[in-house]
Amino acid sequence: MRLGEPSKMQATINITPLVDVVLVLLIIFMVMAPQMRKGPDVNLPNTTKPNAQGDERGRILVSIDEAGGLWINDQPVAAEHFGEALNAAVGAEPNPRVVIRGDVREVMVAIEQAGFRGVGLIAKRTGAEGK
């Protein structure tokens, strides 16, 4: 390079900041994903190998907490109004599926009395970490 000549610019793409941002976002989503579940915390029964729980389209989550309180999705419901609240939660869904978390005996009877057939259950694998 001689004195007085303009220098040539070299255009290169630096992807290091992009990779840093993507990795930080990935870590944030991995930490927050388990906390994004609906409903109260319940103690799930243990099984040796639960079946695949499928997708969430048309799924209504019924939870029973330790005190025996009923929840539909993330809303608490009184036991005497459970049938009406369950029908309201279905709305216009053509093929609703009801999934239960918690102690299931009384809730399964109430769901059948409300006119729904085919109840799914969520369980955790024996020895599995987390909820």
Image: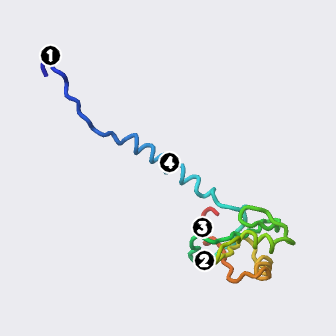
- Neighbour class for label 1 at 10 Å: few (<14), some, many (≥20)? few
Q: CA distance from mark 1 to mark 3?
A: 71 Å
Q: Which quadrant of the figure has residue 74?
A: bottom right
Point out the tag, 2 or 3, that comes first from the N-terminus: 2
Query: SS of the residue at dot 2?
Result: loop
Which x, y percent locates residue 35?
63, 56
What label sits on residue 22 in the rendered view?
A: none
With 109 as the anchor, is 54 left or right in this view? left
Point out the tag, 4 or 3, that comes first from the N-terminus: 4
Rendered residue at 62%/62% (across/down): 130
**Do tag 2 and tag 3 residues touch (Cβ < 8 Å)?**
no
Which x, y percent locates residue 101?
70, 70
Q: CA distance from mark 4 to mark 1?
A: 47 Å
Depth order, front residue of 104/94: 94
Q: Residue type at mark 3: give it.
A: Ala
Q: Is residue 62 above or below residue 20?
A: below
**Do tag 4 and tag 1 residues touch (Cβ < 8 Å)?**
no
Rendered residue at 74%/67% (across/down): 72
Kindly identify which residue carries mark 2. 48
Point out the tag, 1 or 2, that comes first from the N-terminus: 1
Point out the tag, 4 or 2, that comes first from the N-terminus: 4
Farthest residue in the front direction?
92
Q: Is residue 112 above or below residue 87?
A: below
Q: Quadrant of the C terminus?
A: bottom right
Depth order, front residue of 129/77: 77
Kindly identify which residue carries mark 1. 3
Q: Residue type at mark 2: give it.
A: Thr
